[in-house]
Amino acid sequence: LYSFSDDVQERMPLTALSPSSRPSFASAISMLTPSGGTNLFEGLRSGERAVFAAPTTHPVKRIIVLSDGQANVGPSSPDVLGALAARGSEHGIQVTAVGVGLDYDETTLNALAVRSSGRLYHLAEPREMTAILQQEMGLLQATAATDAYVDIVPAPGVQLIGIDGVRASQDGGNMRVPLGSMFAGQHREMLVRVRVTAQADGSHPLASVRLHFRDPSDGNLERVQETVARYEVTREAGAIARRENARTKEIVATNEASKLAASAAEKAGRGDLDKAAQDLAKAEERLLAQAKI
C-alpha cells in the first residue's frame, strides 16, 4: 500500500492479506489524509518495484491505482506515465486504474490501463468502491492465462498496416499484441488493418494468428494455440455487401469516437473548450450513425 502526494510513502510492504494482517492494513488506510500534489509517476513506479519483487509462486501481478489522474508533481504527461506502465507490463505487471470523481483525467488513467493491458474503472461515489474491488478480485481469481500475447504472421502478399485501440509492436512484417493476464470467459477484440495484393479470386490465407500464454493451472506451463485467418477475393458487389461485418464497423466507429474524446479531453485541459466541444459532438455523431445501422 503506497500513498503519493508530493512524495511517496510506503504504508504497508508487500503482504499476504489474512485475518492477522488485515487490521494492519485497515490501520494504515485510516491514517491516509489528503495533502500536497499528485506524484503519480513515483507512486506507480514504487508499486511496480514492489510487485516485481513478488515470488514466482504468484504469477498474477496487478497494481490498483486510485487517483483523479491529474498528476502535477514529477513527470505528468499521459505518454510518459503510459510508458512507465508499459515497462511494467514487460515483467507481467498490469495496472487497474480507478478514476476518482467526475472530473478525473481519463486520458492519463486510460494510458496506464491500455499500455499495460489492464482495466479502467470510474468511481463516481465512495460507496461504489466495494463493488469495483470485488469485481476486480473475482476476475484475478479466475485467471486462466498469464503472460499472454498474440503473434500475427502475415501470409505472402499480405502487409500488416497497424492495430487500432491496443498496444502492439512490430518486428519486420510481423506484429505482436501483449494481453497480459486473462480470466476465464474473457473476450478480447482487436481491429487489424492489412493490405493484400492477391491477383486471383477465391479464398487466400491472411495470417497465422498465434496465442502464446502460460497456464497457471498447469504449473505455469507455456502453451501456444494457432489459427489461420483467411480472406476471400471477389468481384461480385452483392457478395461483398452480404459479407459486411457489423461488429467490425462498430469497433471502427468506437475507436474513432474514443480518439475524438481523447482529443477533446486534451484540448479542454489546455482551456480550448470550443474545440473540445466540437470533438465531442463529432464523436457522438459517429456513434449515433453507427447505432442506426
Image (tube, rainbow, N blue to C red):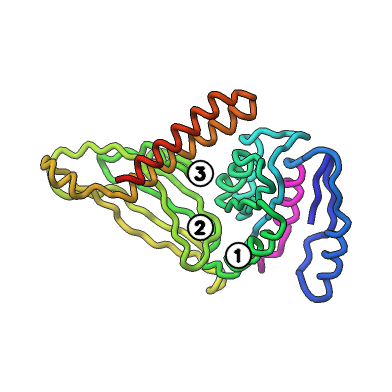
- Mark 2 or mark 3, which has the lower sequence index? 2
- Mark 2 or mark 1, which has the lower sequence index? 1
Q: Is residue 271 above or below residue 218?
A: above
Q: Which residue is mark 2?
A: 148
Question: In the displayed image of the protein, which residue is found farthest to the bottom?
Answer: 19
Going 83% across and 71% down the picture, which residue do you hit? Answer: 21
Amino acid, disc 1: Gln
Q: Which residue is mark 3?
A: 167
Observer able to see residue 273: yes
Question: Marks 2 and 3, Cα distance to the nearest angstrom?
Answer: 13 Å
Q: Which residues are magenta?
A: 42-58
Residue 88, position in %: x, y?
A: 64, 48
Residue 9 included in the magenta stretch of the image: no
Given residues 24 and 265, the one toward you in this image is: 265
Residue 206, position in %: x, y?
A: 27, 47
Q: Quadrant of the N terminus?
A: bottom right
Q: Which residue is mark 1?
A: 135
Which is closer to the viewer, label 2 or label 1? 1
